[in-house]
Amino acid sequence: MLPGSQLMEIVALSLKVSVTAVLLAALIGIPLGALLAIRRFPGRTTLTVLVNALMGLPPVVVGLGLYLLLSRSGPLGVLQLLYTPTAMIIAQTILVTPVIASFSQQIFSDLHHEYDEMLRAMRASRWQTVLTLIHEARHALITAILAGLGRALSEIGAVMIVGGNINHATRVMTTAIALETSKGNLRLAVSLGLILLALSFAINLALHFLRSRLERAAHA
Amino acid sequence: MRLPALPAVLFVLLLPLAALAGKNEIILQSTTSTQNSGLYEYLLPLLERDTGLRVKVVAVGTGQALKNARNCDGDVVLVHARDAEEKFVADEYGLKRNDVMYNDFILIGPEDDPAGVREARDITEALQRIAAARAPFASRGDDSGTHRKELRLWKAAGLDPGAAREGWYRETGSGMGATLNIAAGMGAYALTDRATWISFANREGLAILHEGDPALFNQYGVIAVNPAHCPGMNIKGAETFITWLLSDKGQKAIASYRLKGQQLFFPNAHPVLPGNGG
């Protein structure tokens, strides 16, 4: 029904799209979270509320908005990104960034309270403060990244619209599951779901061990 | 760790851009019925072997396929709603429309047939019986070719259950397979194309209850997107695709696709095609 090579292709694309999106979202979301936690500036509360609210952004809305932008008749149509993995990465980056930013903000504010006095006593510069906090937060940030990866891997609304579920090009685990369900191949659809679950479990397990090793090293 | 990752990520992001330039491939906007039946998985490798052309299929409802093509997000459409296709051409979004193949629609429903549509003389009477019995009916409700056909059939039967907000008439707003899953789940009647039905694996007590009425004819047409409307589209690829599909070779390939021993699509690009087996 679904040859092994094709299954590998779909799993690989799912991982490529979601992991890339999560890395990009971390690059944006972690500094954004740190900024919101540490600096005081006008509009900070509004921005914080906005970022938190965007955690609940429906993927299908992101997909639709991105479709309108990337469509050949849209403002970014010349880039020819619609129906490519790149479009899917952009969509998931948009979905994951608020999750990572919100988690990071919480992590950084907790740490900031804890270290504020000490850093002040040491007359640390702003950059030194941020770097110290990121260093101290690195274990907790893994949780933020995992939450983001969970959102990315399980999402279907956005990748279906901007990817198009094209065989050998943009078909990922979730869109393949939807397709097999619509063919009435419920057994195959469930098997694919279990593989997705196992994949998510394996990633979480690996990062859990990484985290505890980091923690042990830190306390040694 | 963060900074060195950036160039790598950008590289990955820009790869598809480089790959796209000058590639011999087209995007085909098509219907869920043709994809779910496995036709493209059979046909496209044959096409690629003959012409070297790669075809990426986006499978949505006919209405959405035509809209996407209108936005220039495809090079060819292969759909099944003749009036909408002809309007697409008349509005100059597409070039010439060609017949490709046909099969038929069928009325499926619970095996015990509470509305008694098995005894109906034609599809009009069958629908009237469903309405009279207020038996659950699952409609696509998504402006697909099948949905348009269904609406025309209700109209011919002198009924408009959607506008009347009848409780037994359920608009799923989903693809054909998803609608069949829903019909199976609630023991509803539904109109489906035969190809999707044959390939559908979750029948759960559903059966074909009415078929064979000439009004249930299901014609598929192919149209190249108009390069005057979409300057960036791959007209050469689109022409290669259509020429192959309408050639004896392409038509024979369509006729030779079988699932569970049954032919799903009958080529009719030419009124009489000698030796096509269908």
Image: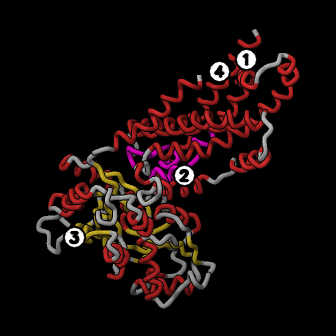
Q: Which of marks 2 and 4 is nearer the N terminus?
A: 2
Quadrant showing the C terminus of chain A? top right
How far apart are labels 1 and 4 at the CA level? 9 Å
- Label 2 chain ID: A
How far apart are labels 2 and 3 at the CA level? 37 Å
Taking the image as shown, residue B22 lies to the left or right of residue B13, namely left
Q: Name the residue under label 2.
A: A158
Residues indicated by labels 1 and 2 sit on the same polypeptide chain: yes
**Crowding at label 3, few (<14), some or many (≥20) Cα neighbours within 10 Å?**
many
Above or below, A18 relative to A124: below
Taking the image as shown, residue A65 lies to the left or right of residue A7, namely right
Comparing B37 with A97, the one in front is A97
Q: What residue type is labelled 4?
A: Leu
Q: Can residue B274 be seen in this view?
A: yes
Q: Name the residue under label 1.
A: A215
Residue found 71% across the figure and 46% down from its top: A51
**Crowding at label 4, few (<14), some or many (≥20) Cα neighbours within 10 Å?**
some
